[in-house]
Amino acid sequence: MALVTMKEVMADSLRRALDKNIDPKERYAVGAFNFSTIPEMVGIVEGAREKNAPVILMLSLGALKYIGSLELVADAAKGIARQYPEVPMVLHLDHATDLDMIKHAVTVGFTNVMIDASQESFEINIEKSREIAEFAHDQSPRGKFGCSVEAELGMLAGHEDNISVSEEDAGKAYTDPALVPEFVEKTGIDALAVAIGTAHGFYKAAPKIRFDLLEEIRKATDIPLVLHGGTGVPDEDFKKCVAMGMSKINVGTGLKKVYTDAVREAIKVLPETEYDPRKIVGPGRKAIAEEIASKCDLFNATGKAKAVMQELYR
Ligand code: 13P
């Protein structure tokens, strides 16, 4: 199957999030995972395939700089999608700020882009997010499906490539539920990243998630909500976010650790005469697949590929 948009991949999760009569245990979030190399992309998809789950492959600006080209990543993702047709998957550009670069990603085949103008004023955030939403919905090579768009309201603490926000500033900038309807309506975006107490990177202390805000934000809009800063969030908090209607959960830093720990261990146990990179970094890819599989269970996305496919062909 070809890559699908995030809007399509989250349609089933969103329907469940908005259904007030559903058992909250029936809700789930689609996992979105950062990668820096093509084997990591494959590991992510293999983990999702093992659990029959949909998945979102996320390219950060740092990873883009390392890999070197949006086209290369888009072509690799298209190839992986052909190789694993049973996995509904999205290629997402994360936390991008440069409008021209985001438009370029849309034209080469990314199926979701994030415009992060959350550090700008409310008005500029609306303006930039709307420009990207209009462009992505009209001009993607994916024809009538276009490319979907995520934007952020409020600010997350931590460091994400070109964006750094201190904990003090972030504490002042949780997503304001009162601004959500206007932001969603004026921008035309497809998913909203919320700042409710998580942060990018490892936590010094367990995060205090503002579930009260999540409840208000979920009531304020009917588009999918996105939780950033998934590394180090306690399992129970993830489950509560999912039960309350979160549709996408981003995990990055923790995956880097899983990968690197596995590679370090391989180097430690292999003889010094072993030079085959497949034996050295291969365990990293396998460890990533295992981690994704366990996140699919945690986010309750296991077994949901079929429901996503049914929604696609509705
Ligand atoms: P972590 O690196 O904290 O898991 O956050 C990832 C993220 O939110 C990417 O957008």
Image: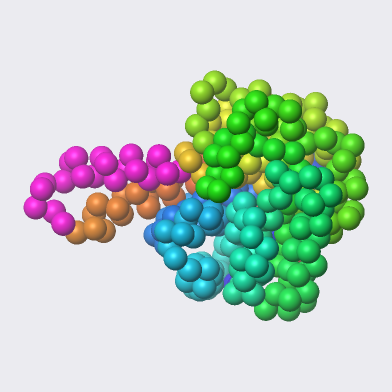
Main SS, magenta residues: helix
Residue at image point 47% right, 39% down: 254
Where 22 falls versus 65 (above or below)?
Answer: above
Where 192 falls versus 70 (above or below)?
Answer: above
Q: What stretch is highlighted in magenta?
A: 255-275
Q: Can residue 190 be seen in this view?
A: no
Residue at image point 78% right, 36% down: 175
Counting labels gives 0
Image quadrant containing the N terminus:
bottom right
Q: Is residue 285 visible?
A: yes
Where 129 falls versus 270 (above or below)?
Answer: below
Left or right, residue 64 beside residue 198: left
Residue at image point 80% right, 30% down: 213
Asked whether 155 or 44 is in front, the reply is: 155
Left or right, residue 233 beside residue 312: left
Left or right, residue 180 beside residue 77: right
Q: Is residue 112 magenta?
A: no
Q: Does the magenta stretch include residue 266?
A: yes
Q: Where is residue 19 in the image (x, y as percent from the top left)?
A: 86, 44
Q: Where is residue 196 in the image (x, y as percent from the top left)?
A: 72, 32
Asked whether 171 or 234 is in front, the reply is: 171
Q: Position of residue 56 (x, y in %)?
A: 59, 55
Image quadrant containing the C terminus:
bottom right
Residue at image point 26% right, 58% down: 278
Where 209 falls versus 221 (above or below)?
Answer: above
Residue at far top of view = 205
